[in-house]
Amino acid sequence: MEFVHASKACASVGPYSHAVKAGNTYYLSGQVPFHPVGGTIVGSNMAEQAAQTLANLNAVLEEAGLKITDIAKTTVFIENWDDFEAFNEVYANFMGDHRPARVCVEVSNIAGGCLIEMDAICVVE
């Protein structure tokens, strides 16, 4: 296994890596809308927080030498299902024509009071 630390993503807040490569599969840890330098939440609404979360996810992709089209599946946790439409719009713009499998669920408490957290599984063939 190989462990990936992305200097342009927010720092890990626990004993884990930004991503782990096992064979041709990468498991990306959950990303939240923390600013990569200050560690504070970026944005006060779902659209802003989703954009920062995806920017952090993209920083991990880049550090691992991956691209958006390598994403096979995402898991998304949102605090309020009423924010799904705003999240989905930002997500669609980020993914472009790429359509990985996805799980999206409402949860009651995300780290640091964030509105969103998202992880991904990537496959390089």
Image (tube, helix red, strand yellow):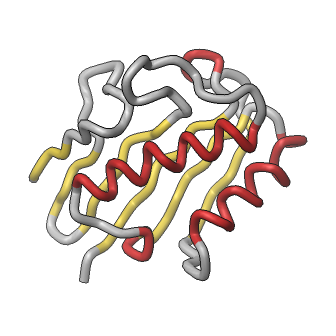
Report whether 118 appears left or right of 28.
right
Up-down relation of residue 52 to residue 115 (above or below): below
Numbered-mark total: 0
Q: Residue at x 26, y 30 (%)?
A: 16
Q: Residue at x 57, y 16 (%)?
A: 112
* Res. 107 image quadrant: top right
Q: Residue at x 31, y 72 (%)?
A: 123
In this orientation, which residue lies closer to the viewer: 110 or 63? 63
Position of the C terminus by quadrant: bottom left
Residue 91 location, x and y as percent? 65, 59
Residue 120 location, x and y as percent? 44, 55
Residue 12 location, x and y as percent? 32, 26
The residue most toward the left is 1
Up-down relation of residue 53 to residue 101 (above or below): above
Up-down relation of residue 94 to residue 51 (above or below): below
* Res. 46 image quadrant: top right
The residue most toward the front is 37
Q: Residue at x 35, y 66 (%)?
A: 122
Report whether 30 appears left or right of 5.
right
The residue most toward the right is 82
In this orientation, which residue lies closer to the viewer: 6 or 24? 6
